[in-house]
Image (cartoon, helix red, strand yellow):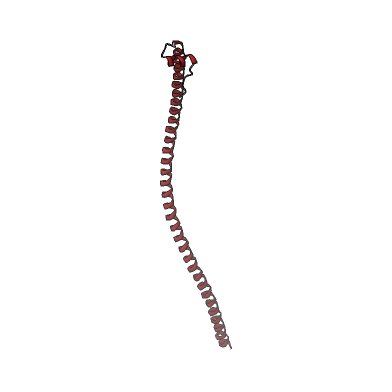
């Protein structure tokens, strides 16, 4: 803190131990002025601190809300991931079943085609044999 200015008379009066009342009045006024300025500075700092405290409370509330939102969303994400895993496993089972069924169906088609070809061949052979027997009876 600054010292109040002194005048040569005040210095001289203090050295002599004498009155110097005018200088003391000036020093008192200067001290009062410094005191008033100091009080104003403290009040200004207090206002700034209070405003900062208000901002801190608001941001802490927002932080708390965001942390809660994150917790809720994390729980929801976990549930969705579990559901997705179950559904994907089911879909994989469907894919496997469909692939096996299609493969079996293709074997059935191939067997049906083979059976049809054999049946046609046998029918042709039977028709030839019937024709040959029928032709032999006529002759």
Q: Nearer the viewer, residue 130 or 109?
A: 109
Figure check: 106 above or below 93: below
Q: Position of residue 24 (x, y in %)?
A: 44, 13
Figure check: 121 above or below 61: below
Q: Nearer the viewer, residue 83 or 94?
A: 83
Q: Nearer the viewer, residue 101 or 8?
A: 8
Q: Residue at x 55, y 86 (%)?
A: 133
Q: Position of residue 124 (x, y in %)?
A: 56, 79
Q: Quadrant of residue 59?
A: top left
Query: In which quadrant is the N terminus drawn?
Result: top left
Q: Residue at x 44, y 28 (%)?
A: 49
Q: Residue at x 43, y 58 (%)?
A: 89
Figure check: 7 above or below 85: above
Query: In which quadrant is the C terminus drawn?
Result: bottom right
Q: Position of residue 131 (x, y in %)?
A: 57, 83
Figure check: 15 above or below 90: above
Q: Residue at x 50, y 71 (%)?
A: 107
């Amino acid at each position: 803190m600054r010292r109040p200015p002194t005048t040569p008379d005040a210095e001289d009066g203090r050295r002599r131990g004498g009155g110097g009342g005018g200088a003391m009045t000036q020093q008192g006024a200067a001290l009062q002025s410094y005191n008033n300025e100091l009080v104003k500075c403290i009040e200004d700092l207090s206002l700034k601190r209070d405003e900062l405290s208000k901002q801190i409370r608001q941001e802490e509330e927002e932080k708390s809300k965001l942390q809660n939102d994150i917790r809720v969303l994390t729980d929801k994400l976990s549930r969705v991931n579990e559901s997705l895993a179950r559904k994907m496993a089911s879909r994989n089972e469907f894919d496997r079943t469909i692939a096996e069924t299609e493969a079996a169906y293709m074997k059935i088609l191939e067997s049906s085609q083979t059976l049809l070809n054999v049946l046609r061949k046998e029918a042709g052979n039977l028709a030839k044999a019937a024709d040959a027997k029928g032709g032999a009876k006529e002759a």
